[in-house]
Image (tube, rainbow, N blue to C red):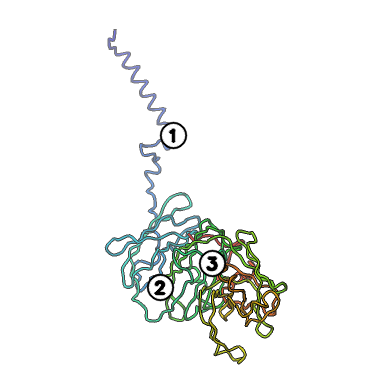
Amino acid sequence: MGRFTRAGAVVGAFGLVAALALAGCGNDREQATFVDGATPAERRTPREPVAPLSVSPAEGAAKQPVSAEISATDLADGSSLSAVTLATADGTAVEGQLRADGSSWVPSTPLEYGASYTATVTATTANGGTRAGHSTFTTMAKPKSMISSGLYLFDDREYGVAMPVVVEFHPGIPEQDRAAVQRRMFVRTDPVQPGAWHWVNGNQAYYRAPEYWRPGTTLHVRVALAGVPLSNGRYGNVDRVATVKIGRAFEMKVDNASKQMTVYEDGQVIRTLPVSLGAKKTPSSSGMMVIMEKKESTVFDTRDEPDPDNRYVTEIDYAQRLTWNGEYIHAAPWSEHVQGRQNVSHGCVNISTAHARWLFSKTKIGDPITVAGTERQLTAGNGWTAWNLSWPEFVKGSALSVPEGGSGSPF
């Protein structure tokens, strides 16, 4: 048993030769694969190197604005940015986020003036591969000519359901620059609600949703104006940031015909108050307004009015501003005897001291009030008039196109 014979060796050798011949015959040789999965043809044809991404700001770019966003300038069809990192000269990472449309990466805070940064950008190609690119650039020195801005929101405050995001610019934004500036004004809501910007003029812009904000909504706002270059040679000076809460639903409706104010909370009528509106010479404005300011006591001084009959100095209690030209809800003990029957004010909504005190205790900045049936219509921009327009009219004031129903979060 187990004895080796020459005949057996010949037969075994023949079998091995036959197997090798079968494995190597014809075109099957080209289909053989190696351990790494490559075919002989692929081994003989070296793969073309993947071209690096071209990054913006470009390699060696100088005097870049501190509002610079990081992007790739040569993305092929079907490719998209997938990751961006930005570091200072000492290697400190800069935080930021990709825009929702993947067009660029926005640093979370303005870059430093006169500083060096290195960006690394990665993109996913249409076939699932990746491309990368790098760039080192420097920012400009702090410019001398700037514009300032204001944001009528303050961190950790609670506002009414009609509170628009109100931004002011001094001096105003030239019309040709409004789209670029608007792209740097970010609003994120939780829960998510669509919205849009509306430019009243170059000095003021509002952001609101198609309907009032949902009670309990959190608004995260960043007006990232710092370093934004304008066509008139000026630059934005600072970023304005606020995170605020929207409170319960509270609304006031004033009807000139009945001379009554109906007060609603969470959709239910909680009180009806008699009012006296503006006399015929000084009518109250009809329209949708919001409470802009509250003062428990103040002084109305109208001695600079052109009409001598409208000049007075009067101490006022429980004043709540509705317009820039001086219309308020306030206590008016001198007109209590005609409230609910006759209009005698200079344009304000007069109510009794007791009712004014109660209402003042209930309202928040941003609560809506509608006045109907007077001789004068509310003028756009006379107060925070964002809600005095229908949604289709409102979106016409955007410097950028607005999808039907409104834009979502930029991130």
Image position of 71 (left or right of 261): left
Quadrant position of residue 106: bottom left
Quadrant position of residue 86: bottom left
Residue 384 percent coordinates (x, y): 56, 73
For badge 3, the amino acid type reads: Ser
For badge 1, the amino acid type reads: Asp
Above or below — where is 192 with respect to 363? above
Pointers 1 and 2 in contact (C-beta within 8 Å): no
Residue density around tag 1, few if under 14, some if 14–19, many if 20 or more, within 10 Å: few
For badge 2, the amino acid type reads: Val
Cα separation, mark 1 vs mark 3, equals 89 Å
Q: Earlier in the sequence, mark 1 or mark 2?
A: 1
SS of the residue at dot 3?
helix
Q: Which mark is residue 361?
A: 3
Q: Which mark is residue 28?
A: 1
Q: Earlier in the sequence, mark 1 or mark 3?
A: 1
Quadrant position of residue 310: bottom right
Of residues 410 and 206, the one drawn nearer to the viewer in this rendering: 206
Above or below — where is 280 with respect to 340? below
Of residues 138 and 147, the one drawn nearer to the viewer in this rendering: 147
Above or below — where is 128 with respect to 152? above
Cα separation, mark 1 vs mark 2, equals 69 Å
Residue 121 percent coordinates (x, y): 39, 58
Residue 38 percent coordinates (x, y): 39, 41
Cα separation, mark 3 vs mark 2, equals 35 Å
Q: Earlier in the sequence, mark 3 or mark 2?
A: 2
Instruction: Tell me the residue that label 2 is attached to.
Output: 238
Residue density around tag 3, few if under 14, some if 14–19, many if 20 or more, within 10 Å: few
Of residues 83 and 207, the one drawn nearer to the viewer in this rendering: 207
SS of the residue at dot 1?
helix
